[in-house]
Image: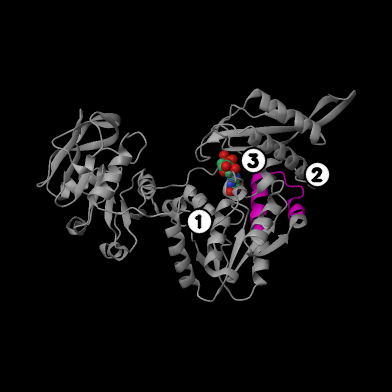
């Protein structure tokens, strides 16, 4: 059976990625392409159905992104969402108007006319989410109105014979109560898809593609300990086995047990070809005397690339480099509207791309979302400590040691961090904080231990809740848990006599202290 594929044509919507995720969750493989992708390219992908996304423009403006008319003549099932619906309507001869007041937010859906399979299972008066400035006021020939809201006469429309449907609201967002049902109806009832896509099917296809791409060449991959590079390497190894060499640069700034965890998982359990480079002393000497956060990041990034290149040069016949690039990066880098904001921190992904290297890239995760990467990791047999790993900055503990980095200070923050992790994990909080760690501050303060005065280090504990790290709130950890963490750190980590809990959100703070 050929792969059922749905293509989302992106007209600049905020929600295109969400549409693709929903479609995949419903068991149909889905890709997002720019709205002006040539028809010939779409034909090559042999889509089973098309979804036209929303977008920020108005179809009444002649310069706004337009639809290739061949799409509507293709006979494919089509769902237009918001701007996508208006484009369909306009092309097929409907009348649209600009609303005096744009409509944002919730609205109640009233079903119109007889039952349509498109809205099967959607009750009258369910909530939908609106965000539009234009409205269809006269339908194109062949279409009927399927639902309205108090402020939007044509909230859903369809031409069952041509299998073309449109919704003015956003079925992909969680605020539309029956949105998932509507998308499911479109895929299964209207487009007649089997919806049997699952991660195992992805593995089969990816393995075949990697074999074809690589042929007999050698491939290298930098393992960082993080989820993405781990899953990418394991997938490539599934395809080409011994032809892949993974390089793990131990820069000495990983958390307790992490370096051993990588070696155990990849060498001992998965039997990957693994080169471990102990570069701890080298990084430490390069970082000596540097206390500026940006400098730390830059030094670590450069050094990482230098070590990686040296190791890669020792391996003969290498033609390819594996990268754990994910779908959101692929999409974002293609969107011209996305302007880089102010640089807050230069996020340097250790395990990232040495730009000057002359290898072709293999990016086996470039069509997956983060949560799908975790599912894939499990399907490939990666252990939980890798698949469930919380986000960890590429420069590692270096940005959690405020001020100078010395071996001694690395050990202090590593020991404190291990306690924070152990205790938070043991507490089985629900919901679990998104990220939690210890920071070693340069502050020293007076304490009393036994009967003596101490003048020791201040460790800060940070635990946050977040969706994606872009914004965050401090986690309201139970006081008893904070007490256990504090007592253990002061008792078990030499040189620390005081613990503070960070109660700032992002913004105005950032997640990491540096
Ligand atoms: P900030 O501190 O910018 O962190 O609020 C947001 C998220 O990004 C992680 N982070 C990094 N990740 N390289 C990375 O790969 C970096 O240099 C880096 N700095 C911060 C941070 O842990 C949090 O999850």
SS of the residue at dot 2? helix
Q: Which residues are magenta?
A: 283-304
Judge whether residue 60 is colored magenta.
no
- Which image quadrant shows ligand 1? top right
Task: Count every numbered label the image shows and give the total.
Answer: 3
- For disc 1, the neighbor class at 10 Å (few under 14, some 14 to 19, many from 20) is many
**Residue 233 spot, x, y in % from top left:** 57, 61
Which residue does the numbered mark 2 point to in the structure image? Answer: 408
Residue at position x 67%, y 60% from top? 268
Report, in whole angstroms, how far the alpha carbon at label 2 lies from the one at label 1.
35 Å
For residue 514, the mark is 3
Tell whether circle 1 marks a residue whose Cβ is less than 8 angstroms from ligand 1: no
Residue 286 part of the magenta segment? yes
- State the mark number for residue 61: none
Task: Judge left or right: residue 68 versus residue 499.
Answer: left
Give the percent coordinates (x, y) of residue 6.
Answer: 31, 55
Does ligand 1 reach within 8 Å of label 3's beta carbon? yes
Please identify the residue farthest to the left as the structure is shown.
Answer: 141
Q: Name the side, left or right, on which 422 lies relative to 42.
A: right
In the displayed structure, would residue 339 be above or below residue 471? below
Residue 325 is tagged as: 1
Q: Residue at x 64, y 52 (%)?
A: 298
Q: SS class of the residue under badge 1?
A: loop
**Secondary structure found at label 3:** loop
Residue lying at the far right in this picture: please name it.
451
Q: Tell me what residue is drawn at x 58 percent, y 54 percent.
A: 382
């Amino acid at each position: 059976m050929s792969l059922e594929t749905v293509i989302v044509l992106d007209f600049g919507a905020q929600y295109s990625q969400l549409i693709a995720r929903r479609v995949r969750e419903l068991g149909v493989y889905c890709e997002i392409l720019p709205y002006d992708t040539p028809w010939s390219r779409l034909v090559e992908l042999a889509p089973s159905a098309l979804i036209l996304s929303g977008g920020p423009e108005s179809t009444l403006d002649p310069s706004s992104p337009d639809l290739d008319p061949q799409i509507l003549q293709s006979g494919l099932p089509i769902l237009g969402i918001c701007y996508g619906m208006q484009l369909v309507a306009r092309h097929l001869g409907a009348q649209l108007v600009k609303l005096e007041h744009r409509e944002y937010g919730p609205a109640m859906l009233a079903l119109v006319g007889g039952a349509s399979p498109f809205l099967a299972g959607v009750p009258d008066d369910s909530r939908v989410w609106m965000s539009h400035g234009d409205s269809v006021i006269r339908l194109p020939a062949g279409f009927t109105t399927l639902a309205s809201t108090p402020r939007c006469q044509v909230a859903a429309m369809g031409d069952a014979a041509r299998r073309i449907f449109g919704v003015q609201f956003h079925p992909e967002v969680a605020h539309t109560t029956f949105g998932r049902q509507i998308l499911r109806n479109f895929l299964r009832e209207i487009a007649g898809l089997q919806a049997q896509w699952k991660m195992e099917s992805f593995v089969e296809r990816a393995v075949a593609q990697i074999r074809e791409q690589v042929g007999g060449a050698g491939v290298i991959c930098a393992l960082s300990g993080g989820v993405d590079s781990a899953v990418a390497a394991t997938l490539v190894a599934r395809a080409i086995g011994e032809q892949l060499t993974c390089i793990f640069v131990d820069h000495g700034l990983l958390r307790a047990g992490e370096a051993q965890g990588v070696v155990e998982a990849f060498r001992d359990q998965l039997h990957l070809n693994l080169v471990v480079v102990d570069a701890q002393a080298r990084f430490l000497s390069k970082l000596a005397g540097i206390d500026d956060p940006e400098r730390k990041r830059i030094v670590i990034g450069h050094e990482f690339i230098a070590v990686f290149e040296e190791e890669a040069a020792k391996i003969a016949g290498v033609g390819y480099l594996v990268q754990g690039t994910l779908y959101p990066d692929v999409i974002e880098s293609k969107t011209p509207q996305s302007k880089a904001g102010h640089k807050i921190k230069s996020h340097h992904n250790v395990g990232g791309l040495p730009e000057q290297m002359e290898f072709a890239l293999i990016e086996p995760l470039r069509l997956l979302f983060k949560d799908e990467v975790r599912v894939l990791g499990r399907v490939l047999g990666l252990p939980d400590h890798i698949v469930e790993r919380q986000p960890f900055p590429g420069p590692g503990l270096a940005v959690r040691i405020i001020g100078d980095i010395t071996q001694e200070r690395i050990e202090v923050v590593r020991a404190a961090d291990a306690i924070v992790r152990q205790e938070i994990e043991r507490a089985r909080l629900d919901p679990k904080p998104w990220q939690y760690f210890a920071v070693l501050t340069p502050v020293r303060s007076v304490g009393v231990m036994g009967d003596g005065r101490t003048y020791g280090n201040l460790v800060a504990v940070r635990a946050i809740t977040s969706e994606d790290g872009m914004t965050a709130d401090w986690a309201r950890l139970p006081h008893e848990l904070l007490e256990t963490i504090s007592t253990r750190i002061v008792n078990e980590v030499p040189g620390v006599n005081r613990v503070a809990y960070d109660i700032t959100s992002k913004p105005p703070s950032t997640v990491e202290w540096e």
